[in-house]
Image (cartoon, rainbow, N blue to C red):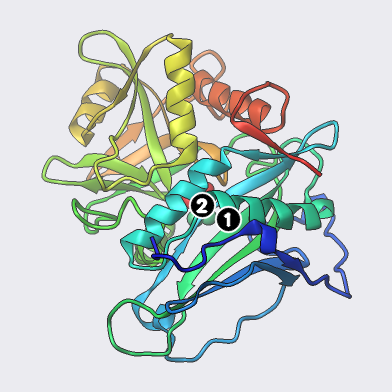
Amino acid sequence: GNGNLPDIDHKNIRIERSKNLKPPLPYKDLVFGRSFTDHMLSIEWEGTIGWSNPLIKPYGPLSLDPSSVVLHYSFECFEGMKAYKDKQGKIRLFRPDMNMKRFVKSANRIALPTFNGEELGECIKELIRVEENWIPQERGYSLYIRPTLIGTQAFLGVGPTSNALLFVICCPVGPYYKTGFNAVKLLATTENVRAWPGGTGDAKIGGNYSPCVKPQIEAAAKGYQQNLWLFGEDDEVTEVGTMNCFVYLKNEHGETELVTPPLDGTILAGVTRDSILSLARSWNEYKVSERKITMHEIIKASEEGRLLEMFGAGTACIVSPIKEIRYRNLDIKVPLDPKDPSNNAGPITKKFADVLMGIQYGEISHEWSVIVDK
Ligand code: COI
């Protein structure tokens, strides 16, 4: 906490409306993360003063001193969440409390000031009300919301920052897969690791993402869309690209099991990950495990015909089916839909996508979908 200094308080929010609103892009032209809405939320922090009154203002460039700590030592953390418009025109968020809790946790991990996550959530709702016209009203489309916190003290010393800026920007996004699923080929990365015990793999900080781009370029040059991130002497599976990883298989005891690596500090606690685990546990159709899974186990399952499906899970594309893994000198084929080989995703993968979207768009009633009152 920040002692007795003022915390974020949504009741003090001020709105400065933009005088030249941009025309929204046609839905078909939406590219993830390219075009932004008219306004942004901005809240400043000063160590001796606390959090400023939240301000919604026209979207625009930041002015930063070149010595700002964010630019030198990566004092930056962020969140990714979406607002949806349902068939009745109601605005919905998906488990925003989880994003707010994780945002505070990430800030704390890199010694940025913390704040009341619920209050920030209320400020974000206000931003979404202002930007309501930017939320596409069609299944698959949504408004991607990017809360960001940076250290802004002008100082080259390595230490806690006396100043910070929290801002939230939004971009309308289309469905990740415009023409059905696009199953990906992975290159298992054996030269680099994404995270390690005691590190920052479980914090959503910019510093976790930039080091993964070079391996991704190398994978792409060899024809693989994503990296499969491994860790440890026995090559445990950790994450896939920027997503959590799920393996659906018949295990060595003959049980059908959905496996994802445990939150041991190296894994980002994805909201989609948690939702998939909860849904699967509530359905009670197969064993659901958060446990270590090694490449050896995946190879053996593949060789014995027990590897059933694999997919990545994250907010941006919900689920991303995996069709092949290159691991050292082995090509491991992952089945997609055994009943219909023309399908680009297996039945379990597809069911998670369908049910999660159903909840997000309010077609399936669930407490996870939070209506934003207008
Ligand atoms: C995800 O939603 O899966 C992400 O990791 C977001 C990405 C754009 C950083």
Judging by the rendered image, the residue that carries numbered circle 1 is 120
Judging depth in this view, the residue of 207 and 43 nearest the camera is 43
Residue type, numbered disc 1: Leu
Is residue 2 shown above or below 95?
below
Residue type, numbered disc 2: Gly
Q: Quadrant of the N terminus?
A: bottom left
How many neighbours does mark 2 have within 10 angstroms: few (below 14), some (14-19), or many (20 or more)?
many
Residue 222 seen in render: no
Judging by the rendered image, the residue that carries numbered circle 2 is 117
Q: Is residue 113 left or right of residue 171?
A: left
Circle 2: element type: helix
- Contact (CB < 8 A) between labels 1 and 2? yes
Quadrant of res 351: top right
Is residue 167 shown above or below 240?
below
Is residue 341 shown above or below 42?
above
Q: Position of residue 226 (x, y in %)?
A: 42, 50
Q: CA distance from mark 1 to mark 2?
A: 5 Å
Q: Is mark 1 within 8 Å of ligand 1?
A: no
Q: Is residue 181 left or right of residue 92?
A: left
